[in-house]
Amino acid sequence: MTAKTYKQRFVDPLIKKLKEVIREVFYRYYKALDSYHRLNNTNGRLYRENEHLSIVNDKLKGENEVLRSELKDFRFLRKVLGSRQIDNLIAQAKDIEQQRKQTQRTRRRNTNYER
């Protein structure tokens, strides 16, 4: 067998096969590298979001404790003064607040026309 024939039958197909394998290895490597970077970015974003949500959660826990304390006090007042009296006081306070807001709206309207 001559060197030329040996090269054509064995070496050239082997080199062609090796090139295909190397090409596939590089393709998969770059694909994996891209996936790694994407996952790393997503992980970082999710970590920051988690930190933010933890801070919000701590804030809401504190607010919840304050509201529980106020609810305890409110229930105690209802028990001592009675539900009807508390309901009447709440209705009066809401009416007063509504009247105050309405007078503020009319003042704003009047000042706008005077300009």
Image (cartoon, rainbow, N blue to C red):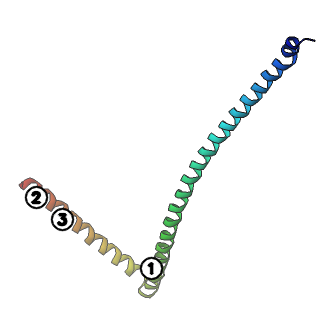
Label 3 crowd (10 A; few <14 / some 14-19 / many >=20): few
- Furthest residue toward right: 1
Judge from the rendering whether residue 44 lies leftward or rightward of residue 108; answer left or right. Answer: right
Marks 1 and 3, how far apart in space?
A: 30 Å
Residue at image position (51%, 72%) is 61
**Label annotation for residue 111:** 2
The residue shown at (14%, 62%) is 107
| 29 relative to 106 in the view: left or right | right
Residue 103: give x, y in percent of width and height: 18, 65
Q: Residue beneath label 3, please?
A: 103
Instruction: Judge by depth and name the residue closer to the eye, 90 or 113.
Output: 113
Label 2 residue SS: helix
Q: Secondary structure at mark 1?
A: helix
Residue 13 falls in image quadrant:
top right
Q: In the rendered view, tell whether residue 24 sits above or below residue 93.
A: above
Residue sitting at x 21%, y 63%: 102
The secondary element bearing badge 3 is classed as helix
Figure check: 39 above or below 82:
above
In whole angstroms, how far apart are the C-alphas of marks 1 and 2? Answer: 39 Å
Give 58 or 37, whichever is nearer the viewer: 37
Tell me how far mark 3 sits from mark 2, CA to CA.
12 Å
Amino acid at the residue labelled 3? Thr
**Count of labels in the image:** 3
Q: Give me the disc on residue 70.
A: 1
Q: Say which amino acid is labelled 2.
A: Thr
